[in-house]
């Protein structure tokens, strides 16, 4: 085993950080090295993949080093990390008795080795030596490009809500309804009932009438593609009724519904409305899951006779608007 210089091990940590970025994680890498040059543990941030707040690079590297060296005490080791440790990781460093910490970039948001607080100087039972700034520029550059790429992707994903005003737009919305309802509902309703409901509620004639009676329809657009539609109505009790939200099959599962909810929340704040409510078929499990995940809760249920021997067996869901939340 050969003891290399600090830069050698920081490069190793940087490589792990890059790997984290490739996997969609905030790029942070860490390496625990014993004073004879033996690499006892490595880690990269994997909070998203593991869905776990504890999965920071340092914690993973320390965990591995304890396993490799067969004990919790990592005296005689140096931890190299590409970003200033947060309070959790600084605590893990103190508790593992690591001799020395070398970090690259500072973290103004959570850094606890000098930026917000310096936990290594607070008189705990162990105080590691700290060096900062080695390969700082490389780490900052990596973080910066990761976040700008993330913003670019988010922006690309964004959809537009185009209000339905012209006859042509109503025809386009009705065509979307016809396509989506016949694809979505067969597991819940009979074909006859779907035909009946599309004609009664989502034909050009029905939509035109609803718009005249205070409904607003929007077509959801992603670039040039019409990916779905939604319809709302403002009620006298200060709530927004979300009458329809339908997204074409090939576009589902991309978070577009959440984007619509975000739009509607803004709409409520702008128009001083205190809640969004909607009805959903009790057997529409997938939609119910989406609403629940988005913060809607069940506030009632009802069976409505819609004529022709058909009924709608629905839950009422409501989402209260928090004015402070962004
Ligand atoms: Zn941390």
Image (cartoon, grey):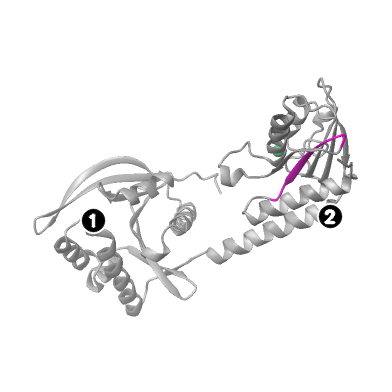
Q: Which residues are magenta?
A: 27-36
Whether residue 34 is in magenta: the answer is: yes
Q: Nearer the viewer, residue 81 or 324?
A: 81
Q: Is residue 111 visible?
A: yes
Indicate which disc residue 187 carries: 1
The residue tagged with tag 2: helix, strand or loop?
helix
Whether residue 183 is in magenta: the answer is: no
Can you name the residue that lies furthest to the front here? 1
Determine whether 65 is above or below 326 in the image: above
Determine whether 254 is above or below 207 in the image: above
Of labels 1 and 2, earlier in sequence is 2
Q: Is residue 133 visible?
A: no
Q: Position of residue 151 (x, y in %)?
A: 63, 60
Q: Quadrant of ligand 1?
A: top right
Residue 183's quadrant in the figure? bottom left
Which secondary structure type mostly characterizes the magenta part of the structure? Answer: strand
Q: Position of residue 308 (x, y in %)?
A: 9, 59
Q: Nearer the viewer, residue 80 or 175?
A: 80
Q: Position of residue 10 (x, y in %)?
A: 82, 47
Per the image, the residue denoted by label 2 is: 137
The residue tagged with tag 1: helix, strand or loop?
helix
């Amino acid at each position: 085993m050969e003891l290399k210089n600090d830069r050698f091990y920081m490069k190793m940590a940087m490589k792990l950080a890059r790997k984290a970025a490739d996997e969609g994680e905030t790029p942070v890498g860490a390496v625990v090295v014993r004073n004879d040059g033996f690499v006892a543990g490595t880690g990269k941030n994997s909070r998203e993949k593991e869905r776990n707040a504890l999965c920071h690079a340092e914690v993973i590297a320390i965990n591995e080093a304890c396993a490799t060296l067969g004990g919790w005490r990592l005296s005689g080791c140096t931890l190299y990390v590409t970003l200033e440790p947060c309070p959790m990781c600084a605590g893990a460093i103190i508790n593992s008795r690591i001799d020395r910490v070398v970090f690259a970039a500072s973290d103004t948001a959570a850094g606890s080795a000098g930026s917000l607080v310096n936990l290594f100087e607070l008189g705990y039972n162990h105080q590691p030596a700290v060096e900062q700034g080695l390969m700082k520029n490389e780490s900052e550059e990596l973080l910066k490009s990761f976040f700008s790429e993330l913003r670019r992707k988010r922006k690309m994903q964004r959809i537009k809500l185009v209000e339905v005003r012209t006859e042509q737009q109503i025809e386009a919305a009705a065509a979307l309804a016809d396509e989506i309802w016949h694809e979505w509902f067969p597991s819940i309703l009979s074909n006859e009932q779907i035909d009946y409901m599309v004609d009664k509620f989502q034909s050009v004639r029905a939509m035109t009438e609803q718009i005249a009676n205070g409904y607003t329809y929007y077509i959801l657009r992603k670039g040039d593609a019409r990916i779905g539609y939604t319809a709302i109505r403002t009620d006298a009790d200060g709530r927004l009724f979300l009458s329809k939200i339908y997204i074409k099959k090939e576009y589902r599962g991309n978070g577009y519904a959440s984007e619509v909810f975000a739009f509607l929340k803004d709409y409520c704040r702008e128009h001083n409305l205190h809640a969004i409510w909607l009805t959903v078929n009790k057997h529409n499990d997938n939609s119910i899951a989406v609403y629940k995940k988005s913060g809607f809760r069940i506030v009632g249920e009802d069976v409505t006779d819609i004529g022709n021997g058909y009924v709608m067996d629905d839950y009422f869901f409501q989402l209260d608007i928090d004015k402070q939340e962004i």
